[in-house]
Amino acid sequence: MANMANKDAEIRTRNGGPSLAVIGCGYWGSKHIRVSCDIRDARLSMAVDPRPDRLEYIRSQYPSVAVSRDIGAVLNNPSIDGVIVATPVETHFELARAVLQAGKHALVEKPLAMTSAQCRELNAIAEKRKRVLMVGHTFEYHPAVGVMRQMIKSGSLGELYYIDSRRLNLGLYRQDANVLWDLAPHDLSIIFCLLEEVPQTIGAWGCAHVLPNVEDVVYAKMGFKSGPTAHVHVSWLDPVKVRQTTIVGSDAMLVFDDVQPSEKLRVYQKRFRPRIDGDSYADFQSAYHHGDVHIPAISSSEPLKLEILDFVNAIVTGERPCADGMHGLRVVEALEAASACLRLKYKHGSNGKDQRIFRRRNMPAGGPEVAVA
Ligand SMILES: NC(=O)c1ccc[n+]([C@@H]2O[C@H](COP(=O)([O-])OP(=O)(O)OC[C@H]3O[C@@H](n4cnc5c(N)ncnc54)[C@H](O)[C@@H]3O)[C@@H](O)[C@H]2O)c1
């Protein structure tokens, strides 16, 4: 898996760069609009949303951007090269397919679509039409993720034991997705990017406390062929905002805390190696190593900007973007597998039982197995 978190955007562009449009001008779409207007390698030509209030806001903030309630204004506009889809997840597939079939490049927000079959279809259309298909896995572009990936690759953490990723806060509840589909795409894309591997097994446990059948707390665990395990905890029902990834190796450990305004990454020279030649309490104590804490310098580049620059670069050069449509597929496969575990909970009322493993019949070769509660 390619990664450009550390590659601060050397973009080769043709004159003026590609022309972009954003479909969906809500919370996240308006960030895409801000960043797209700010880069000089492309120009944002149009923004589309069915809500007049959103269009009025965009018009007032970005007078040079044409606005429309009709996506036909984008699809039928031959001067638009690339389209960013930042709408609710249930609309991703139809909109992305229409964009690709109109001969335009597509950057689709996470998760790429609602099912892996839809993701495969989008990848196939993009391949056939030679268009870029990218997914908004913003954290794959986070400079801290690039540094962590390098540390794992260089072996400086030793043998990798486990990764623990937590994304918690109070709200925002969504009706189009549960907390797994809303927040876990970030954790899954970070973990797959760090390990350069997809899981062999996935188990998930969750609870819908507030809205019926919409899980607001989910725990997932994954096993990887190369050895490490990974655990993801996502919640809309937690008093404290947490955005934390911990990586534990045999030689060192690190914590990526994205809530911190700076010094987001800390590497702890801590480890535990039990002594085999002593059985006193003092021997046990001395098996712990408490060394330095190192704070690596990380670039302050905005991940969303790096993501959009990668999209622009892919349009201009034909190079594969780092978070391409296949990355989108892998995350959706994992979400589907975890959702299968959650659904079985409702079927059997077996929340929290021991796990057994089976292979889903419709999972493609190499896809994850499902560990079912
Ligand atoms: N990458 C990230 O870090 C990140 C962060 C937040 C949200 N997101 C993703 O962005 C997407 C949008 O989330 P949001 O929080 O901005 O939601 P939102 O509800 O704030 O905005 C969605 C917008 O899409 C518009 N819309 C709905 N259907 C449409 C259609 N058919 N055509 C055009 N516009 C349509 C709505 O009117 C609304 O303005 C979701 O897929 C979400 O998962 C990604």
Image (cartoon, rainbow, N blue to C red):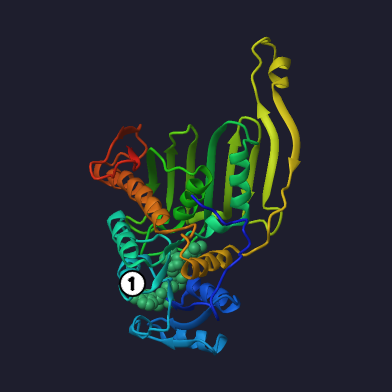
- Residue at which label 1 appears: 95
216 relative to 64, above or below: above
Q: Is mark 1 within 8 Å of ligand 1?
A: yes
SS assignment at label 1? helix
Q: Quadrant of ligand 1?
A: bottom left
Whole-percent x, y for residue 206 in the image: 39, 47
136 relative to 363, above or below: below
Does residue 199 appear left or right of residue 31 in this picture?
left
Does residue 357 appear left or right of residue 110 in this picture?
left
Whole-percent x, y for residue 228 in the image: 50, 34
Q: Nearer the viewer, residue 98 or 271?
A: 98
Dot 1 amino acid type? Leu
366 relative to 31, above or below: above
The residue positioned 62% from the left and 58% from the top of the image is 7
> Is residue 8 visible in this depiction of the protein?
yes
Whole-percent x, y for residue 71 in the image: 35, 81
Whole-percent x, y for residue 5 in the image: 59, 56
Around disc 1, counting alpha carbons within 10 Å, would you say few (fewer than 14), some (14 to 19), or many (20 or more)?
many
